[in-house]
Image: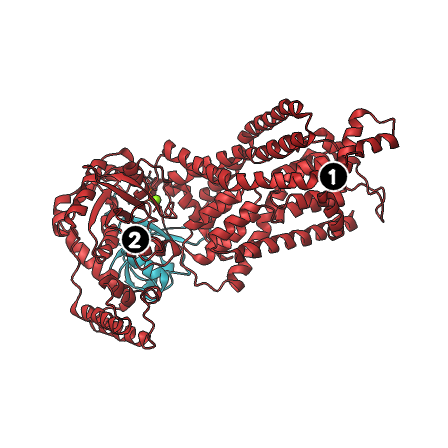
Chain colours: A red, B cyan
Amino acid sequence: MSSKQITVALVGNPNTGKSTLFNALTGLRQKVGNYPGVTVARKSGRCDCGDGLKVELVDLPGLYSLAAASPDEQVVTDVLLGSLEGSQQPDAIVVVLDVTNLLRNLFLASQLAELNLPLALVLNQADIAHEQGLKIDTQLLSQRLGGVPVVLTSAWKGEGIASVRRAIAEVLNKKTKMTKLIWPSQVESALGTIVQAIQADTGQAPSSADAQRILFSSNAHTSDRLGWSQPQRELIVRQARDQVRSAGYNPMAAEPLIHYAHLRKILEGVIAGGTGKQGNAAALDRVLLHRVIGPILFTGIMLGLFASVFWLAKFPMQWIQSGVDFLKAIIAPALVSTPMLQSLVTDGIIAGVGAFLVFLPQILILFLFIGILEDSGYMARAAFIMDRLFSWCGLNGKSFVPLLSGFACAIPGLLSTRTIEDPKARLATAFAVPFMSCSARFPVYALMCAAFIGPLYGPGWESVVMVGMHCVGLLFAVPTAFVLTRFVLKVKPQPFVLELPRYQMPKPSDVLWRMWQNAAEFVSKAGTVIFAMTIVIWALCYFPRDAQMADRIKAAEPTLSEHEIQSRTQAAMIEQSWMGRFGKAVQPVFDPCGFDWKITVGVLASFPAREVIVSTLGVTYSIGKGAEADSQNLRTAMQEAKWMDGPRKSTPIFSLAAVLALMVFFALCSQCGPTIATLAQETGGWKWAAISFFYMTILAWVMAVVVYQSVIRLI
Amino acid sequence: MTPLSQLLPGQFGKLVSLNPDQAVDQRLMALGLLPGMALKLVRRAPLGDPVAIEFGGQVVSLRLAEAESLIVDVAADCPVQRPKNTP
Ligand SMILES: Nc1nc2c(ncn2[C@@H]2O[C@H](COP(=O)(O)OP(=O)(O)OP(=O)(O)O)[C@@H](O)[C@H]2O)c(=O)[nH]1
Ligand SMILES: [Mg+2]
């Protein structure tokens, strides 16, 4: 990309339709959803504005004011000022406004006018305005704002897109700027004071927009960026604010007061009509947010969601599993002459791909439902209902979506923490997400329940334990968040102010696209790592080889059948492999949890990706390769496994205590490489990723010991 | 003059004052909630907090604990932007 590239930024309040417009203009697909804060990072694309004019269009997170409070808002202001690393200031701004709430949307536009950039206004959601009977005199508005183009659009219907292209070309050509408001003279001179002081200190006069940020915003971000660091800085700002006060304004309220007063005058006679019909929200909210019915419906929706995710995903998961098995079965014979290659392909590569593919159905279905709930407008209500349950431990209602996503996969869950404005709640939520019982934990629970809990205590207890295991993580995540936000994190909390959007029919294309995007994130982040790790684990379990192993086993016990020799050989091979040796060395650590060396190998092998445990147990318990959670052979082998020596000699390894301890260990342990990597990326460094890893792993061990030791004493 | 938290669901009020030094109040001012503005406490969340307030044609959720500095003047005949047709 050359430096001559013309860039145009899409800016506006959250949920106004910026991304929808971006998609319409560029032909790309950005995530769209009826939930404030869907766009979390800037994204750019090519937009053709006619006459061969091609511009780089940048879609940005929504914001209400340039007085940035949250990190996302900071990104937007930094992009607009060109102060972000590797980005230049845009050549023009397209402000996207919700035409049904014009006054509030114009506040940001009015602040943006201070940036002195060519600017066009897009009044979006014209279809809703039409429904409500609102009429907007765009010409009058344009005229009052200094001739900037004002375009009425309905982005998701594709109406008015051509005019937006024309408007962009026009502002780039004519460099039309929006008329700025006239500040009261005392405010003007207060701004002058700041400009002069900075010029004297740094040698460079700041823009008026920067001066306003310093005067009106309480954070020091702008001063720091300008390098204004003289000791009297605080004093000068205080004096300037006193000047504002002398005009009768509280300095912290002056900016919105003056802008809104100005805008009310601008809008006089611009808006006509309006039937008073507030749309569907009030009526639906009366039911969905009802004191009694609301929570019941909420619980029903969530239970229904989980039930259907597991139900619907069951069949495609089986298909994928049989597909993988089929593939192995047809490839294995072809490679029989090269055993190492055969093992690499079937146990390494195919098993590795299969290991993450089986989770795809659950992830797709859960995100389909989340997408529907979000686009309908219900998710913001869910946040409203749930906020009280989260607020006491320092999280907020918006933590709900990431935690819910975490039940499918932590990675999309972590990515969606970005919609949380409060940095404290965001970090605490990110810390809590990996505790949620993701679909990769499911096979472990399923195996243990089917092999031990079910046969011993009946299917009733089996489901109780199954549900209980899904709650264990939540049980520990909440107090963890409490301690984290109360005692550890020293970040200034942000208030929880959430706009409740209107309800709408979810748009299938948007919902399906978001589902697809979340799945793609999972595949690209988790898939590759899980795949690579499966191969590494395969190698550790495969080498070194002892070529005479089979012969020795045959010599020792000549009566064994061919099949038995084979599985014994495999078990013996893994015992003397790197992984086996390591597992035996480490076993004493896990002895208090009741894990023998074979389970220890499984635990160690599953640190990069926890789902590996089932197939590893399959190998160590010598039922051959390709074990599945519902494999009868593996169950029997595990049920019959006994301690070979020590005080527990010839008692079953998989006692109730050990089974529960193992499940609790998996519920809590940080066994997912991609999650750690995503956590590092989302929290801006490896510090929190490392803390999370050690915290969860140590907690898992401690709880496994507690469970094992107490159950053993009780029963 | 009553704090916002004293408003009953469905009650209207006019904003008298807020505390511009607080982050919540700054956010609300950016949304257009300025002294003199009419507002309505639409409802409380099922657990009592947060509350949904309506002003300037929008519904916004906020926590009472964070919005304790909002002082309103309760007036039964003070509609929010547009008059309601239903009683
Ligand atoms: N009725 C109607 N809905 C629209 C229109 N444009 C967008 N929407 C809907 O408004 C919602 C928000 O759209 P987005 O494009 O995600 O909004 P955004 O401004 O990018 O939002 P953030 O990224 O959260 O700041 C979605 O549900 C869209 O389908 C429109 O012209 N008419
Ligand atoms: Mg967006």
Q: Residues within 10 Å of mark 1 (few under 14, many from 20)?
A: many
* Residue A200 spot, x, y in % from top left: 25, 74
The first of marks 1 and 2 along the sequence is 2
* Residue A154 spot, x, y in % from top left: 25, 37
* Residue A133 spot, x, y in % from top left: 20, 39
Tag 1: residue type?
Ile
Q: Residue at x 65, y 51 (%)?
A: A700
The foreground one among A263 and A529 is A529
Q: Chain for mark 1? A: A
Q: Is residue A545 left or right of residue A105?
A: right
Q: Residue at x 46, y 45 (%)?
A: A401
Give the SS element for disc 1.
Answer: helix
* Residue B10 spot, x, y in % from top left: 34, 51
Q: Is residue A99 left or right of residue A460?
A: left
The foreground one among A350 and A609 is A350
Q: Chain for mark 2? A: A
Q: Is residue A49 left or right of residue A427?
A: left
Residue for badge 1: A574
